[in-house]
Amino acid sequence: MASLFKLRLRDITPRGLYPRSVLMVVLPVVLLLTAVTYIFYDSHWRHTSRKLSQTISSEIQFMVMLRHQYPDQFALLSDEARIAMQLEVEVLPDTQLPTEQKQLFFTALDEILSRELDVSLEAPFWFDLSGYSEKVEIQVQDGPDVLRFFAERDRTFSTTGHIFIVWVIGATGILVALALGFLRNQVRSILRLTEAAKAFGRGRDTYPYRPSGATEIRDAAKAVLDMRTRLTTFADERTEMLAGISHDLRTPLTRLKLQLAMMEQTEDIKSARGDLAEMAAMLDEYLAFASGSEGEQPVEFRLDDLVEEVVGALGNKSDIRASEPITLIARKSLMRRAVSNLISNAQGFATKVEIHVIKGPHMAELIVDDDGPGIPEDQREEAFKPFRRLDVSRNQNVPGTGLGLSLARDTARQHGGDIRLEDSPLGGLRVRLRLPI
């Protein structure tokens, strides 16, 4: 039960390298900016604005007190206040305070000034900070009259705090942009290496790729290129050896077939001729595979058209259903032989064959269903091994070399795909060939 509530970091973070890198750069910067802004607001800007509001509130309190003590000389004192304290004072006789309180969008200034005026004054007051003028209007009820004060905005609260925030945000934006640009270049090198590795895995040996990026990425790219070279060399040597052995064995096999044809046709001789025919078929399979893969480059073709060509060439009718045109880049002759092996196997063991060509978001699927005897689930992996012919009813009186499925899977994996065997809705075997689009 406790494991259900166990929260892992990877469950809430992005899975991609670039989003994770961006998060690692942006999140600390945002947290630092937030902390700096809060400290500046609480320790500097708010404190400075409070002191300025206290000063202007004390000056207003002082002027109200002077009006009470020197009512006849208040006009002269007001002129002196304008010069000495830069505080304009005007008496509005027989006037009441406005009923509507105007506020700034940023209400912290209203709260600071309102609190300081409330502490300094015992009379009702009203102020307006919402305008864009350089003056702040403050009105105080003094008996039946209203004293209206106009003070400089920068003497009422700090008006330069936003400049610091703008500079911090601007500098942070520049740093984040530079970091994102650097990360994008590094991630682009990794993505190009990934695409190159996928292309090499799909048999596209001529994919244009040049190592780039940081030293570690270049080293990884060189390792991939070296591995591709070794694998390609190994595959070429294996193909040449396979073709050479197959070609050299055809001559003695032909002599043996001629000698057996000239001998008396007993049951043993007939059995020997059958064995030789099977060996010749194996060699044909080897030669066809070697000639089909050696030197062939991937080309662009439509898988649905290829399936129709294969079915037409086999001479047997199968029900073909294609969802939509599917274009692949692969070695066409190898793919034709793989598709031919899958369909011919199904037609050889069943009376009804259905073929589905399906286009997915990333993979194309060729599904071959038959109503034959099928293959038990525990023996399906064995069916892909070379020369392995399962000892079940599916192989009774059916010619073959036991290489069809093995070569088909080898072809699929060379192109970044695979083949799976499943139960068919028709009662027999379903062969699912998946290839990257």
Image (tube, rainbow, N blue to C red):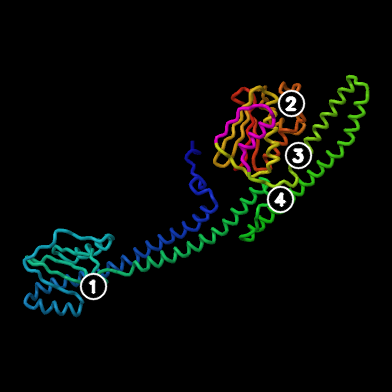
Q: Sequence order check: which comes first, mark 4 or mark 3? A: 4
**Disc ID at residue 289:** 3
* Residue 272 spot, x, y in % from top left: 87, 25
Q: Which residue is mark 1?
A: 152
Amino acid type, callout 3? Phe
Q: Quadrant of the C terminus?
A: top right
Q: Sequence order check: which comes first, mark 1 or mark 4? A: 1
The image quadrant that residue 387 belongs to is top right
Q: Is residue 276 left or right of residue 221?
A: right
Q: Which residue is mark 2?
A: 390
Give how far apart the Cα atoms at labels 3 and 2 are. 22 Å
Q: Sequence order check: which comes first, mark 1 or mark 2? A: 1
Point out the stretch of residues depicted in magenta: 301-323
The number of discs equals 4
Q: Which residue is mark 4?
A: 228
Give how far apart the Cα atoms at labels 1 and 4 are. 76 Å
Along the line of sight, the residue nearer the viewer: 282 or 72: 282
Tell me the residue at 53%/55% (across/down): 21
Magenta-drawn stretch contains 147: no
Q: Element type at marker 3?
A: helix
Q: Element type at marker 1?
A: strand
Q: Alpha-carbon neighbours of circle 4 within 10 Å: few (<14), some, or many (≥20)?
A: some
Q: Nearer the viewer, mark 1 or mark 3?
A: 3
Give how far apart the Cα atoms at labels 1 and 3 are. 92 Å
Q: Nearer the viewer, mark 3 or mark 2?
A: 3
Amino acid type, callout 2? Leu
Q: Element type at marker 2?
A: loop
